[in-house]
Image: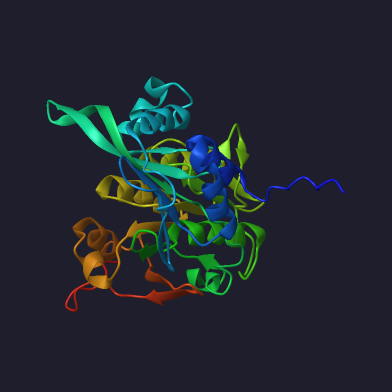
Amino acid sequence: MEAKPRISTLTTAEKEIVRIVPQRFRGAVEQILEGGRADEIRFIIDRPMQAAGRRGEQVFLQLKPFTKSEACEMLEAICGHSVFAREQELLQGYVTLAGGARVGICGKPLYENGKVTRLTAVTSFNIRIPREVIGCAERFIGRFFDGSMPLSAIIAAAPGAGKTTFLRDCARCLSDGIGVPRSLRVAVADERNELSGTTEGHAAMNLGIRTDIMEGIPKAAAIPMLVRSMAPDVIITDELSGAIDTEAVSEAAKYGIAVIASIHAGNTAQLRSKAWLRHAVEDGLFAKVFLLRRTSHEISLYETDILDENKRRRI
């Protein structure tokens, strides 16, 4: 009897990951992706391939170590055989693939006049696997409301804890009216194209039926543009990083638009160490600050107070 052809269950992002890795690693990478337990896959010159997730790490000693020539081959595949065209992304240390997978790239940069001008050699890659977990925000989304009005909020967590995954499902719930008083017009400022995984206008991730997406430009520029052009009720964005981003949030607040954003911080002390964030909370730009925790089984969300005990929010 003729064997039935194997049907791939990989997402667009996962197929892109398989495409960029050298041929001899593809079978192992497909197994990792189909297993669904890894959050990242690492390739380092002269080292074996590694996969890591919440349940631990796997080192593929049965495969020969990754080579320098394979690193060059992989960089070409990541950049669509035009490294020059992706140079600005490379200077930030990563490239986002179609479907939303982000590849961190490490090596030897050329540092001139106080800034990195180009990458002269690549030594390692860290592929972050995007996960769409439909429903992960549903039991929490009501906490982002005061009555029927959405609130601006920060979602903080350590790297790899699931902030982006959680934000995606927040967008879907708000846009589709799931677990909330009413459906809302949502706009996503997707600077790194990780939230939506948009390729040629098609979003790989389900962000809801009332969601507009602006991808590929800094959120400090995208947020004011979305305010002016799309009249959203809520703007969602990933990884605020400083005062220039909170200035854009302030622009949205002037028009009564809520902003839900993530930030890298594993605990309240780390949040308090960010002066620009404390000032934003004191000024009332964010009504709530949440810490997100993830175990292998579930996501938890805890509200925290990052202001000093003797300070009161400015009104």
Q: Position of residue 202 (x, y in %)?
A: 63, 38
Q: Position of residue 204 (x, y in %)?
A: 61, 45
Q: Is residue 233 visible?
A: no
**Relative to 102, residue 297 above or below:** below
State the colouring used for the structure image. Answer: rainbow
Residue extending farthest right: 1
Q: Quadrant of residue 106?
A: top left
In the rendered view, does 166 fall on the left or right side of 267? right
Determine the residue positioned at 51% across, 75% down.
297
Residue extending farthest left: 113
Determine the residue positioned at 45% across, 36% down.
216
Residue extending farthest bottom: 309
Query: How many numbered circles does the render carry?
Result: 0
Q: Position of residue 206 (x, y in %)?
A: 62, 52
Q: Quadrant of residue 159?
A: bottom left
Q: Nearest the camera: 259 or 37? A: 37
Image quadrant holding the C terminus, namely bottom left
Q: Nearest the camera: 204 or 254? A: 204
Q: Is residue 185 visible?
A: yes
Q: Position of residue 191 (x, y in %)?
A: 43, 41
**Relative to 235, residue 77 above or below:** above
In the rendered view, does 167 fall on the left or right side of 135? left
